[in-house]
Structures are given as C-alpha cells and as structure tokens.
Image (tube, rainbow, N blue to C red):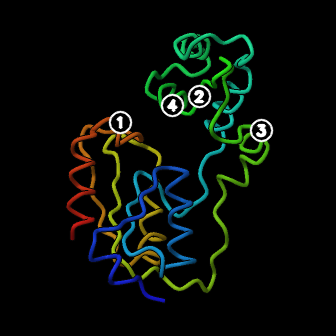
C-alpha cells in the first residue's frame, strides 16, 4: 500500500541512523502504509560490519553495573575500549539509574551481543517492491560507513531517495552537524 497522505500532510517521518537506519528501511519496505516519509542517516540497505558493534557490546557487558556510582565513572571505565567520547556518550545515554541506586541499560544488551550478526545482516529482498515514499538519505562527508555500491541498491529499493552529503561530518552525522541535520529533517518532513 501507498503511504498515508494524511500522515504525510502533518510532516511525519521515520528516522533511523546506522543500524537503526537499516531497521527503518525494512519497516518502510514491509509496511509502507505506516511510513509516509523516511530519513536514513549514514546507513544503507546492505549488511553492516558487526565488528565495531560487537566491541561496543563487549565493553558494555564488562562494565560492572553493581559497583557503578555514576555515569561519569562508567565513561572513564569504558574510555580504553571505546576511545571516541561521542560514541561513549551515545551509548551511555541508555544507562539509567533506578530509585535504589542501581544501574541498568534501557536496551537488552545480552540479546544484542548474542545476536549482533543477525542485527547487522540485511535480508534477501528478491522480489520486494520498492518503497514508494520520499526518502532523505543523509551521508557523512568523512564517513566510510556507506560503500559506493550502496547507491545502486538504494536506488532499486528507494527510487525517490535524495542523497545529501553532510559536510564536515563522519558516521555520526547528527552528532557532528546537529543543526544541519535537524534543519534538513525539518524541511524534509514539512515537505
């Protein structure tokens, strides 16, 4: 089915970055009636590398939550395994204290670590009709995350995709250029 014109009129868009971008693309392909517009940030309809995510998952699992006293302490403990402070900050945003002072992750870390290969895979979509709605495809100028071969697959599955390269941005386009990315998404969603 085609995207709902009423939802498109109010500026609704599904937005996903990296692994979340692949999930958003699959959602749009499988249920286009629920996704009037799609924004993909530095992701492609291809299998992604499990290595970095597996390293992050391992670092998070090694963090002793029972002895943790603050998010800053967690940040220091993970600095060697995850040297980029932006990535640590992104991951630590999902670390939450409870009323009793204990800490927990908002996501299911054990399942993510166990199924990282499945999570970073891309299914065989032979015969899949393309997504009919508009797509904003944001790519980081300095990111090596999206290979050139992804453009052909993107055109086949998302023929209305408009690629926009975000200058002075790497894979974390929204962290590197938050104002530019926010403006691009607002204009696209209004559109």
For marks 2 and 3 on the same chain, the one whose residue lies earlier in the sequence: 2
What mark, if any, has residue 93 been given in the picture?
A: 4
Q: Position of residue 66 (x, y in %)?
A: 75, 16
Position of residue 78 relative to residue 26, above or below, is above
Give the label, 2 or 4, closer to the camera. 2
Q: Position of residue 70 (x, y in %)?
A: 57, 13
Alpha carbon separation for disc pair 1 and 2: 21 Å
Secondary structure at badge 2 equals: strand
For the C terminus, give its image quadrant. bottom left
Check contact, mark 2 vs mark 3: CB within 8 A.
Answer: no
Q: Is residue 99 left or right of residue 174?
A: right
Disc 4 crowd rating (10 Å Cα; few below 14, some 14-19, many 20+) is: few
Give the label, 3 or 4, closer to the camera. 4
What mark, if any, has residue 110 been given in the picture?
A: 3
Q: Is residue 79 left or right of residue 13?
A: right
For marks 3 and 4 on the same chain, the one whose residue lies earlier in the sequence: 4
Give the residue at mark 1: 175
């Amino acid at each position: 089915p085609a995207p709902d014109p009423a939802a498109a009129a109010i500026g609704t868009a599904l937005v996903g970055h990296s692994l979340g971008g692949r999930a958003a693309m699959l959602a749009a392909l499988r249920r286009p009636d629920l996704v009037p517009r799609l924004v993909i940030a530095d992701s492609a309809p291809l299998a992604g590398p499990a290595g970095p995510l597996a390293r992050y998952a391992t670092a998070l699992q090694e963090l002793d939550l029972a002895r943790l006293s603050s998010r800053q302490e967690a940040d220091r403990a993970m600095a060697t395994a995850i040297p980029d402070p932006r990535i640590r900050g992104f991951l630590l945003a999902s670390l939450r204290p409870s009323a009793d002072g204990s800490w927990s992750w908002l996501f299911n870390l054990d399942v993510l670590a166990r199924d990282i290969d499945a999570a970073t895979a891309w299914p065989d979509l032979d015969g899949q009709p393309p997504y009919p709605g508009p797509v904003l495809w944001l790519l980081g100028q300095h990111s090596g995350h999206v290979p050139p071969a992804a453009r052909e697959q993107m055109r086949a599955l998302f023929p209305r995709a408009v690629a926009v390269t975000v200058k002075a941005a790497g894979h974390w386009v929204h962290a590197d250029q938050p104002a530019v990315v926010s403006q691009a998404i607002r204009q696209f969603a209004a559109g």
